[in-house]
Amino acid sequence: MSKDLESLENLKNAFTLLPGVGNKTAMRYAYHILKLSKEDVQFFAQSMVQAKNNVKFCLECGYFTDNDVCSFCVDRANADTICVVKEPKDVLAIERTKSFKGLYHVLHGTINPLENRGPDDIRIKELLQRINKHNIKEVIVATNPDVDGEVTASYIAKLLKPLGIKVTRIAQGISIGSELEYADDVTLGKSIMERKIIN
């Protein structure tokens, strides 16, 4: 690209920072930005900066929020069930199913010995604290159905069973190796409703 189009090249390169966006798609996005009104572009840019500056992790569950504590933790404070997920985006996937009304707990990762990521590197200690605080009766482990997700689910089950907590795992309607955010709402909802106790 010629030097007089350096700004366009920079814009294209910025879009390639997004997951799954290659050069062609990034260029399409860059051309589209040029077609937008100045007001729309300013709104787009300000929204990104505002989200980056304001969105943080909930002090309770680890989900995204603009406040110290998210609305799930505030509105469902009396719930006796916690659904444990790997990433904040998994909370939205489960919420779309409208099949769960309890609390959430985001681990921000899963156990993976090959990558030197153990139980102390994810939010398991915080999970134990919340179980005691909220008098939780059931923990649903909704990590992805891959090796790391299964290892993490087994670890949590072994940790909680001596405490008399019922530990369940979402049913296997979700394909092995897939991610929750890509599961359709009906399948994911069914997998939560048909969850199984982890032995």
Image: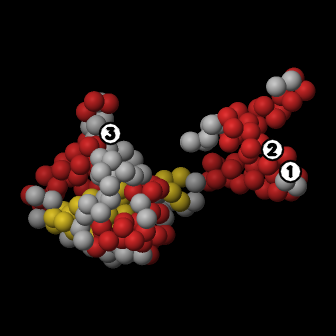
Residue furthest top as drawn: 3
Verify CB contact (< 8 Å) between mark 2 and mark 1: yes
Q: Earlier in the sequence, mark 2 or mark 3?
A: 2
* Tag of residue 35: 1
Return the x and y of residue 35 as percentages of the image width and height: 86, 51
Q: In which quarter of the image is the C terminus?
A: bottom left
Nearest to the observer: residue 92 or residue 9: 9
Task: Indicate whether 10 appears above or below 164.
Answer: above
- Residue 73 visible in this rendered orientation of the protein: no
Residue 131, image quadrant = bottom left
Real-space CA distance between mark 2 and mark 3, rounded to the nearest whole angstrom? 42 Å
Q: Residue at x 83, y 33 (%)?
A: 7
Return the x and y of residue 95 as percentages of the image width and height: 44, 69
Q: In which quarter of the image is the N terminus?
A: top right
Q: Name the residue under label 2.
A: 31
Q: Mark 3 points at which residue?
A: 121
Residue furthest right as drawn: 4
Question: Depth-wise, is mark 1 or mark 3 nearer the camera?
Answer: 1
Q: Which residue is drawn at 32% across and 71% down?
A: 190
Query: Mark 2 belongs to which amino acid?
Result: Tyr
Return the x and y of residue 138 as percentages of the image width and height: 22, 68
Query: Mark 3 belongs to which amino acid?
Result: Asp
Q: Which residue is drawn at 56% across and 42% down?
A: 19
Question: Left or right: 165 with respect to 54?
Answer: left
Question: Left or right: 165 with respect to 71?
Answer: left
* Tag of residue 187: none
Return the x and y of residue 118 as percentages of the image width and height: 26, 37
